Image: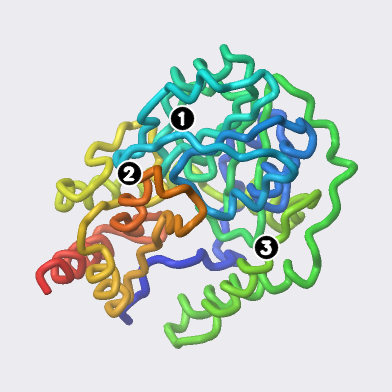
Amino acid sequence: MNTSIGGMFALQREGLPENGNGLLVLKQPSLLMVNARSALWLLARQLKPRKVWLPSFLCPSMISAIEKAEIAFYPISKTLEVSSTSWLDDLDQSDLVVFIDYFGFPVNPLIMNMAKRKGATVVRDASQSLLSLSTNEADFTVYSPRKFFGVPDGGILVSEKHALDIVDQLNPPPQHWWKTAVHAGELRRRFDLEGEENLWFSVFQDAESKSPIGPYRMSRLSENLLREHVDYDVSGQQRKDNYRYLASHLGNEAIYPILPDMVVPLGFPVCIPDRDQVRNHLIENKVFPPIHWELGSTVPKTFSQSHQLSKSIMTLPCDQRYNVKHMQRVIYHFQNGRSI
């Protein structure tokens, strides 16, 4: 069977370790929410910032999490770095600044400290760096385990410096949506086991389009899986091994050709001018590279480097579901797609 590579994680129910080795962020003062967007929503609602500063390269859904606050953008380069610090002069003490750890690579702590010295509240969006190790200078950190493991929901808000004592005010996930999310994971699991086409992708898209934003907590199923039934060390090492194998063959196209030991990658981001042609060829051969992200009209066109990146970036899958043989398939079809 020619396994599909990429796409959502199957809901894992069997073959779980009897005891996982524990997720580090769950051992810190944390608030378990239904998703990362709801964590951002909660911060904006609680802190009531005058202005929320966001990077010019981001998932457009982040905008929907910000309520009743002016939004401003700061520039991100084609290499996913903060390309200017002049915007820091406009920061106010009542502002909130969000930094993103792109693809598992932690944001430069110096830029976070510069924002903090201005008196702003700093939020680190670590949705893509759940397993990476780094010094954390942020006031709040947001994680998204759904990007790494087969759980139907989950966002984690962490702060060692600020009280997170509103857990009793959180509601269960909306039941109709949650059942749809679980169903999508079960269908994907069946697809992985049996290899026959089913409706997992359309059900997944339906769940994503209706994903809730608000005062909702993580489901007990997701919490139990994350606390007890995931081997984070093995998962992280497999991601690193797969990434480094891809880098040894596709390093010239990689945004990050070198993987530091402390980084556990979300995926393998490449930047190529013929992105759409290559991506279509990969999809035809059952390799599904997502685009992080298509900006559209979300970000002003004046942030030209971010828009250029949006048109040329895609993420090759390299997560723990796969091994070297899968990576060889990815490389083969990537290179064939470039030669068309």
Locate residue 330: give its quadrant: bottom left
Can you give x and y, in whole percent of width and height, for residue 300 in the image?
46, 48
Give the colour scheme of this rendering: rainbow
Residue at (73, 67) in percent of width and height: 178
The residue furthest right is 168
In front: mark 2 or mark 1?
Answer: 2
As helix, strand or loop, the secondary structure at mark 3 comes to: loop
Instruction: Say if 205 sits above or below 150 in the image.
Output: below
Q: Is residue 312 left or right of residue 291?
A: left
Locate residue 5: give its quadrant: bottom left
Q: Amino acid at mark 3?
A: Ser
Q: Is residue 189 left or right of residue 251?
A: right
Residue at (63, 47) in percent of width and height: 36
Q: Is residue 268 visible?
A: no
Residue at (79, 25) in percent of width and height: 163
Location of mark 1 (residue): 133
Location of mark 3 (residue): 211
As helix, strand or loop, the secondary structure at mark 1 comes to: loop
Q: Amino acid at mark 1?
A: Leu
Q: CA distance from mark 3 to mark 1?
A: 29 Å
In front: mark 3 or mark 1?
Answer: 3
Q: Are marks 2 and 1 in contact (CB under 8 Å)?
A: no
Q: CA distance from mark 3 to mark 2?
A: 30 Å
Location of mark 2 (residue): 305
The residue furthest top is 117
In front: mark 3 or mark 2?
Answer: 2
Q: Earlier in the sequence, mark 3 or mark 1?
A: 1
Q: For this rendering, which residue is in front, 93 or 212?
A: 93
Query: Badge 1 local density, few (<14 within 10 Å), some, or many (20+)?
Result: some
Q: Is residue 34 visible?
A: yes
